[in-house]
Every structure is written in structure tokens, then in C-alpha cells.
Amino acid sequence: MPDDIDRRLTEQRNPRSARIDQMETLDIVDLINAEDRLVAAAVGAQRQQIARAVDLIVDGLRSGGRLIYVGAGTSGRLGVLDASEMPPTYRTEPDLVQGVIAGGYEALLRAQEGAEDHPEDGAQAMDERNIAENDFVLGIAASGTTPYVHGALQRARERGARTGFLLCTPPSGQLLQEHDVVIAPLVGPEVITGSTRMKAGTATKMVLNMLSTAAMVQTGKVYGNLMVDLQVTCQKLQDRGERILMDTLGLPREQAVTLLDAAGGHVKTAIVMARLGLDAEAAQRRLEEAGGALGSLLT
């Protein structure tokens, strides 16, 4: 292969879509759908690396650390999205899981593509967040080459944090040596060459879902398969909290409403109150003693 040919899998042309500009609409839809079916298998092939990353994240969280996602463009937006969903879903503090995107807030609303070219800005973002040894920093870059991400990860390692890399092209030996874990779902060339918001973006979202969800399960934020640490901040979550109490405790709606109110809107506390016959303050103490793990407290 000539030296001027891009070897990154994310930049290769997909022969199956070479004539997409001549296809009928339904054929375009079917082609994209067929390509998307490849994503789950590619993510599944990385199951051991994903599990390794979860263990690193959980170890850090239990030691007072944080999970930090760093990316640019689509990768950065997906990291911010996943992080932003943790407080309402699992009642985490806003800084426990953070998404850092090149270009900052403006890049969430409008592309700031040039922002990804400055590794020193990535390093500065780590300094601003006082990254430390108990933190786990995951760089997200479909191509594996984004300077902003590499700059951030280098500084994170210098500050003692453990690091991981999520990309959609075969990782280099150097990348494998530098980081504690590398996750590389190889989804193949995109339908539109280089448009990594497509299959690579879908794979990224799937991996982040696995990482954050498994970490929250492992840190006691889930009871059975119920999000018992949710924040009751809107009517939908109020209803979900009430239904969780109705399901787990066998209560009618009216009693579930009263119990949830007595627990300050905290479903997990309400369950302990009902099961162990405690008031809210005592129930919260028991939960703290159990490290927040409702399952172990009630067995």
C-alpha cells in the first residue's frame, strides 16, 4: 500500500456502498440497516476489554475517583451524553462521571472541528479537573488519532490516573502499551466514507452504555434490574419511583406515594424503611454502612 494511503479502517471505502448515490431510497435504507447489523457483533468481540474497563472504573469509584470521558466531535458528544444521564438515572453527583469535549460547550451545539487538533488543550482540561490517581480517563476517538484526546490522556497518565482508549480501527502496539485497556470494536468502513457518526458512533454509544451501566450495577445503584437510585426530578421519574415501590413492596399507589415522600424522594431509602421498619434517617445510615448495596442489605 502506498505511503499516502490512509490505513485507518475508519477512512477506508466500503465497496457495498460504492454506488449508493445511484440507489433508490428503500435500497439506501436497507443498506444502512444491513451495515448497522455488523455493529453489535463487533462490540461483542471486545467483551473482555469492556469488562476490564468496567473493573478499572469500579475500582476507582470505590476509592473516591471519577470516570472521565474525553473526545472530539461525535465521540465527545457521546461521552457528554452518557455522563449527563448518570445523575437522574443513578443519583450520582454531577462530577462523578464527566464528559469532556474539544471546543467545550459550544461544540455540543455546533461543530468545532479545529478544536480537536490541539493536544495542549486536552492536557489543560485534565489539569482543570485535577485528575488524580483514583480517576479513570477514557479517550474516545473513532480513528484513534485525535490530538486533543492523546494530549488529555498523556497528561492524565502523568497525573497518575489509569487510562483507556476506545477506537474503531486496529490499535497500534504503542497504544496498547500506553493504556490500561484498549477497546477496539472493528465495525468496518462506513457507508459514507469517513462518516464515523454512523457505525463507529453506534458502537461507541453501545460501549459507553455497557461501561456506565455495569459500573453503576457494581456500585450498588441497581436492585434486581430496577434503578432504585433514580432522582425524582420530573413526573416521569416520580411515576417510575412509585411503580418500583409498588412492584418491590406490593403496595397500592397511594401508599407508595406516601412512602416515597417520607423517604425524601429516594426509592432505595423507601425500600429499606419498609422492609426493615426504619425511619428515613436510620434507613440511610444502614445503606451507608452497606456501601449503598440494597441487595446485600436485605438478604
Image (spheres, rainbow, N blue to C red):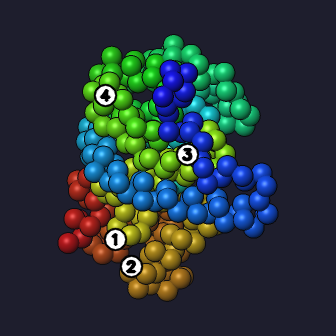
The amino acid marked with disc number 2 is Thr
Earlier in the chain: of badge 1 and badge 4, it is 4
Is residue 132 visible in the rendered image? The answer is: no
Residues tagged 1 and 4 counted as in contact (Cβ below 8 A) = no
- Secondary structure beneath dot 2 equals helix
Residue at 71 percent of width and 32 percent of height = 111
The amino acid marked with disc number 3 is Pro
Residue at 27 percent of width and 46 percent of height = 52
Query: Closer to the camera: disc 1 or disc 4?
Result: 4
Q: Position of residue 287 (x, y in %)?
A: 29, 58
Q: Nearer the viewer, residue 61 or 277?
A: 61
Distance of mark 4 from mark 3, alpha carbons?
21 Å
- Give the quarter of the image for residue 164: top left
Residue annotated with mark 4:
173
Using the image, tell me which numbered label, if any, was put on residue 189: 3
Residues tagged 1 and 2 counted as in contact (Cβ below 8 A) = yes
- Give the quarter of the image for residue 299: bottom left
Classify 255 as above or below 182: below
Using the image, tell me which numbered label, if any, was put on residue 248: 2
Distance of mark 1 from mark 2, alpha carbons?
10 Å
Query: Closer to the camera: disc 3 or disc 1?
Result: 3
Q: Tell me the crowding category of disc 4: few under 14, some 14 to 19, or many 20 or more residues within 10 angstroms, Cα based.
A: few
Residue annotated with mark 1:
224
Is residue 24 visible in the rendered image? The answer is: yes
Q: Nearer the viewer, residue 169 or 59?
A: 169
Q: Position of residue 224 (x, y in %)?
A: 34, 71
